[in-house]
Amino acid sequence: MKFNWGKLKKPFFALAPMEGATDTVFRQIVIDCGRPDVLFTEFTNVQGLLSKGSKQVSQRLKFEDYERPIIAQIWGNNPEYFYKAAHEVSKMGFDGIDINMGCPERNIVKKGSCSALIKTPDLAKQIIKATRKGAELSEKNLPISVKTRIGFSTISYEWIEFLLTQNLPALTLHLRTTKEMSKVPAHWEFAKDFVKLKNEISPNTILIGNGDVESISEGKKKAEDTGMDGIMIGRGVFHNPFVFSGKNYDLVSREEKFKLLRKHIELFESTWNDEKSYQPLKRYFKIYINGFDGASDMREKIMLTNNLQEGKELLKNMGI
């Protein structure tokens, strides 16, 4: 059955696409702790996906049916590459394609990609059109959505208005500007304005709010107060992998955290074997080795390990 943004219950909750974090392994861990209504891949470069190094790049797009609905997020600045990449991604079996127009990372922005597109709406329009055309080549004709920020240097209603004229089934707004990065609180005070614009310009577009949401109860309150159709949670999942279940992580026992860590390591090993470096796995350890006496010392020791076998041996000696 084809995925339809408009048929999701409201408010729905989505796991944000996060670079170097939300791979298939971590997404499956999050699902086991409490399933989000929608999941996104890490953002994948369209040019890289079509290059000789595509095998390594496509690791970002690995997923299991268990993760559905799953949206592939792509980025770049060349409409032709978006056209070709959209066709390739459609054949992989995803439920939708999301265009990253929000990443504020300096080197990416310098190249005119992601949130730099806020300053080049004509190019953004070409990219949306090319991506849609590429997706139409597939039988599934995947829905094309966009994730963006609410301005580059300052908040821009014109940018949001522009996107709302593009007939998008869904639009995610990270409620900060590019220049603000994550250095200031998200501007939820402007969310009602964007919902009003959506209702006036494109009432059928599903609007998703993103930024600083740490719990389901907080997300529901924000959706109720602003009229957002959905809420996207990103960094909150690192503070509490059970966030989508509503469970308080402070009440999770040390033994349960250790069990989750072992599961993560086992899934990492069975999924990637030698395809992926051990180093990125270590960034997750703080999630599980946290909130109990001696956690800091344990983390310090595990972070000094150099490979999976060393890590597993040390954890075993620690009783994990």
Image (cartoon, rainbow, N blue to C red):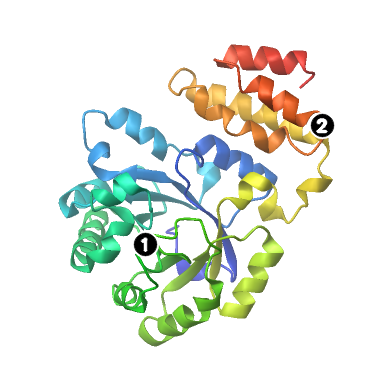
Q: Which residue is under mark 2?
A: 255
Considering only vertical position in the picture, is 10 above or below 307?
Answer: below
Give percent across and percent down for residue 5: 46, 66
Residue drawn at x 40%, y 37% is 60
Tell me whether the residue at label 1 lies in contact with that at label 2, contact meaning CB atoms closer than 8 angstroms: no
Distance from Cα at disc 1 to Cα at disc 2: 40 Å
Residue drawn at x 65%, y 16% is 312
The quarter of the picture where the C terminus appears is top right
Q: Which residue is under mark 1?
A: 146
The quarter of the picture where the N terminus appears is bottom left
Considering only vertical position in the picture, is 44 above or below 116?
Answer: above
Residue 82, visible in the rendered structure: yes
Residue drawn at x 26%, y 37% is 48
Q: Which amino acid does label 1 sit on?
A: Val
Give percent across and percent down for residue 104: 38, 53
| N-term-proximal mark, 1 vs 2 | 1
Q: Quadrant of residue 59?
A: top left
The residue carrying pointer 1 sits among few (fewer than 14), some (14 to 19) or many (20 or more) residues within 10 Å by Cα, namely many
Residue drawn at x 73%, y 56% is 246
> Dot 2 lies on which element?
helix
The residue carrying pointer 2 sits among few (fewer than 14), some (14 to 19) or many (20 or more) residues within 10 Å by Cα, namely few
Q: Quadrant of residue 13?
A: bottom right
Residue 140, visible in the rendered structure: no
Outermost residue toward the left in this view: 80
Q: What residue type is labelled 2?
A: Glu
Give percent across and percent down for residue 154: 38, 70
